[in-house]
Each structure stands twice: as structure tokens, then as C-alpha cells.
Amino acid sequence: MIARGLLLCVAAASLNGCFAAHYLAQATRGQIEILERRRPIDDVIADGRTPAFAKAQLAEVAKVKRFAEAHGLSATKSYTRYADLKRDAAVWVVSASERLAFRSATWWFPIVGRVPYLGWFRFTDAARFAVELQEQGLDVGLRPASAYSTLGWFEDPILSTMLGKDDGALFDLVNTILHESLHATFYVPMRTDLSESVASFVGDELTRDYLDERYGKASAERARYDADMRRSIERRQWMLDSKAALAKIYASLEDDAEKRRQKGIVLGELRRKLGTKRVINNATLAELQNYASGQDELTQLLKCFGRDWPRFIAALREWAKATPTFGSLKDQCP
């Protein structure tokens, strides 16, 4: 599935010193660049230089927006324009955690509150920041993100990084639009785990409903999406199981050297199962809490409302008025 990051590109001046100035400057430059590159989607589709795969996917955007609004997501002016970034990622997201505990580093911003990651528009800036965190003795995650939401501060365009040429590219685009549109509909300040996990759930489930409506439940498109989702869920479970195993190791009475040895074995086995050479560490696994929490509870709530999405969204908004926990979602079911 496409990686997603919520870019915190406003109010970065709440950080201190030279770092604050640098982070704010790069965020401002990056956002301005995107705004300057925007073109109306209809113009891009009509442009003879636009590749066929991009035209086909861009032609789907208006349909997805109408579908989202009909199913309870807020109407916005986002995704009516397109920006060619001429790079492989919209932003690069950096997160960090203690090496022998799942305690994430966090940064605080006005409006959005405390968050467990920072987004950078240039890979070199992200990599430099990642090294600084590593030098502080932290596990560090560095990943590309194809899209982000400004929570309504700007009219977010479709980005070139959201389009792809493989068979699942359309599914990923639909999912990303729905995921990011959920952020404009439902956001809980200072609770990244709630906001991102709900957006991931809604994006995944609404994409399935969109494909049913667009192509039919028995379609090849729906079958392909279901197969992709099964693989994604399986991989996520492997990561959750590894995270649980590591948590037991970290809580044990073994000395730190032994904990590090056992950690290496667990992570090596996980990389083997995932078939990746990518670095996986505490920062990587800690992100699961932000993007994959409360899935069972959300599933039950959606079932309770008979997949009536406007009622489901209304229940989420009511739930967020108190001090929301995924365990309390059951109280929203009438």
C-alpha cells in the first residue's frame, strides 16, 4: 500500500532555535513549490504530453471525490488540481524510538499538538536529521510518503507521486484520496494514533465500497484489491507479532547486550518473512500504533451501522468530543 504522511508544515516556529528556523523554512519552500506547480486536472488530461496511465487515473479523481462526499466525508476544494513534483516522494518522514523500548520521540506543534514524526521535502534534509537522531542513541525510521494532508489549510492537489504504472495503482490512488479526505473530515489533535488509524481504516474499507459501486462485487478489480488487502493484513500481523515479541524481551531481566542480541534475531526473521532488506527497528514498528490501532473496534462500529458511512462518521465525531479511546468506540453503537 502507498505510504502516507501527514505533513506538519504550519506553526513549526514552536520548535526552538536554529532547528525551528530550518524546519519552517524547508516546509514553507516545499509547500510553495507545490502550490506553484498546480494545474487544473482537466487541463492535464487534455494535454497531449500527459502519459495515458496518468490520464486514466486523473479521470477517476472527480468520481472518487463525489463518492467520498456521498458517503459522509467533508466536501473540500482539494484534488481539483495536479502537481508534477518530478521526484519519487512528496515528503520523507522521519520517526525515532528508544532502542530497547517502544518509546517514541515526539515533537509539539500548535493546532495539531504532539506528533511522533516530522516530514521533510528534501531527502538530504531528512537523512541529515535522521543521522542526528541516531547519534542521540535512537532507532530511526526514514520512509518516503506519496501524499499528505494540510488539514484544509491549503487546497491539496493530486501529486505525481500518488500515481503509478502497476496494476494496483488505481486502488492506491483511490485509497489515498479517501484516506487524506478523512483527515479533512475527522482529526483529533494530539492523538496521531487515533487520527491516522481511523483514516487508514476508512481508506481501506471505502475503497472496497467504491470498487463495488464502480465495477461490481464480482469484478476482477474487486478480487485484485481483496488479494492485495489480504497480503497487507498478513504482513501487518507479522510486524505486530514481532513487536509483541520484542516488547517481552525489553521487559525481561536480561542485560542490554542480551536484549540487543535477541532483538537482532527477531528483526532478522521478520525481514526474512517480509522479503525485504529495508531497515526495520523500533521506530518502524512503533508506527504500527499510529496507522493500525483499533481496527477490530472500528470494524465492529461500521458493522453496527450496517456500513452506513454518514452515521459511522457522525458517531466518530461524537466519540471524539470526549477523551476517545478505541475501547470506548462500542459506546457509540446504539
Image (cartoon, grey):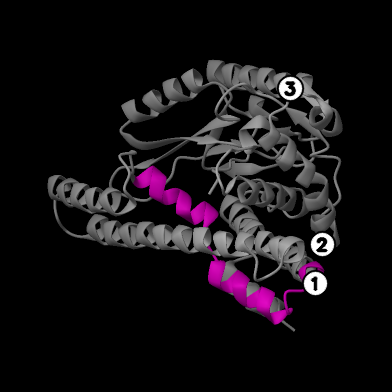
Give residue 96's quadrant in the image.
top left
Give residue 25's quadrant in the image.
top right
Image: magenta residue range: 282-310
Q: Compute the Cα span from label 2 to label 3.
A: 36 Å
The numbered mark, 3 or 1, whose residue comes first in the sequence reads 3
- Residue 16's disc number: none
- Residue assigned mark 3: 49
- Residue assigned mark 2: 72
The numbered mark, 2 or 1, whose residue comes first in the sequence reads 2
Residue at image coords 42%, 50%: 286
Mark 2 lies on a secondary structure that is: loop
Q: Using the image as rendered, state which of residue 125 and residue 159 is in the foreground.
A: 159
Local crowd size for mark 1, using a 10 Å CA cut-off: few (<14), some (14–19), many (≥20): some
Q: Are marks 2 and 3 in contact (CB under 8 Å)?
A: no
Q: Are marks 3 and 1 in contact (CB under 8 Å)?
A: no
Query: Can residue 103 be seen from the camera position used here?
Result: no
Q: Nearer the viewer, mark 2 or mark 3?
A: 3
Q: Are marks 2 and 1 in contact (CB under 8 Å)?
A: yes
Residue at image coords 51%, 58%: 228
Q: Using the image as rendered, state which of residue 144 and residue 103 is in the foreground.
A: 144
Say whether residue 234 is left or right of residue 115: left
Q: Nearer the viewer, mark 3 or mark 1?
A: 3
Residue at image coords 73%, 22%: 49
Q: Compute the Cα span from label 3 to label 1.
A: 43 Å
Mark 3 lies on a secondary structure that is: loop
Q: Which quarter of the rendered picture does the C terminus lie within?
A: bottom right
Picture coordinates of residue 187, whole percent (x, y)? 71, 52
Q: Compute the Cα span from label 2 to label 1.
A: 8 Å
Type of residue at label 3? Arg
Type of residue at label 1? Arg
Mark 1 lies on a secondary structure that is: helix
